[in-house]
């Protein structure tokens, strides 16, 4: 296993369509979720939860999403309509990280939302540590009530991320990263 810093330096986001089988086993999924659940959580509120989407159910959801996409995106081209189901169905595993952040007397909602974001990043890094590729996205599915209902996201909940996980088809190329001199202020 690579050391932690090397692991973070080498993490990439493969295209979802480049994530293929094999995906994580049931035991590996439990490990991913256990690792992701160890994020900072001020007040121990657990302001997030997981929806694991795999197998035949994932394929059915991909099929059921197409008419929802067509209805809410009437401007979509035939190419977009053809591509849409493959985005959700192509990789072996999708884990939805659902934010349950809300009003609390001592813990600001913002901190709860950040905790859900940390869960997403931890899932991505844990998948990478296990030799898988992972891509953290949201997209229209995460913002439209019919699609949220389809994947089991309740009222008052929000999708922090749809983490697509599988085996990358190829080694991911490096992309330009921010120059520290442009993003760091020292005072």
Image (tube, rainbow, N blue to C red):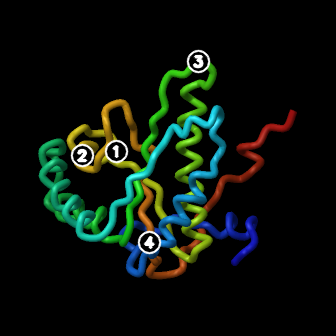
Q: Gap between marks 2 and 1, in whole Å? A: 7 Å
At 55% from the left edge and 66% from the top edge, which residue is drawn?
A: 31
Q: Nearer the viewer, residue 181 or 121?
A: 121
Of marks 3 and 4, which one's residue comes earlier in the chain?
A: 4
Q: Of helix, strand and loop, which one carries label 2?
A: helix
Residue 147 has which mark? Answer: 2
- Estimate the spatial distance between the alpha carbons at disc 3 and disc 1, rounded to whole Å: 28 Å
Q: Residue at x 49, y 81 (%)?
A: 170
List the residue tagged with mark 4.
Answer: 26
Residue 108, position as x, y percentages in the image:
59, 24
Residue 52 falls in which quadrant of the image? bottom left
Residue shown at the point (85%, 38%) measured from the top left:
186
Mark nearest the camera among 3 and 1 is 3
Determine whether, in the image, residue 151 is placed left or right of residue 166.
left
Q: Which mark is residue 142?
A: 1
Task: Give the distance between the C-alpha atoms of the residues marked 3 and 2, in whole angstroms.
Answer: 32 Å
Please tell me which residue lies in front, 37 or 120.
37
Q: Are marks 2 and 1 in contact (CB under 8 Å)?
A: yes
Secondary element type, mark 3: loop
Please state the horizontal and vertical placement of residue 32, each as a whole percent of the image. Answer: 54, 64
Q: Point out the tag, 2 or 4, that comes first from the N-terminus.
A: 4
């Amino acid at each position: 296993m690579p050391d932690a810093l090397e692991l973070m330096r080498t993490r990439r986001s493969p295209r979802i369509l480049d994530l293929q089988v094999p995906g994580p086993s049931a035991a590996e999924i439990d490990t991913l979720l256990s690792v992701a659940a160890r994020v900072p959580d001020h007040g121990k509120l657990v302001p997030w939860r997981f929806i694991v989407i795999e197998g035949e159910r994932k394929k059915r959801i991909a099929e059921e999403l197409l008419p929802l996409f067509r209805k809410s995106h009437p401007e979509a081209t035939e190419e977009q309509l053809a591509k849409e189901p493959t985005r959700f169905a192509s990789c072996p595993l999708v884990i939805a990280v659902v934010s349950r952040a809300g009003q609390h007397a001592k813990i600001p909602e913002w901190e709860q939302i950040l905790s859900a974001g940390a869960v997403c990043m931890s899932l991505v890094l844990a998948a990478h540590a296990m030799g898988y590729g992972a891509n953290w996205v949201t997209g229209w599915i995460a913002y439209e009530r019919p699609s949220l209902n389809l994947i089991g996201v309740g009222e008052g909940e929000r999708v922090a991320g749809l983490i697509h996980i599988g085996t990358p088809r190829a080694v991911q190329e490096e992309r330009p990263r921010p120059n520290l001199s442009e993003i760091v202020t020292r005072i």
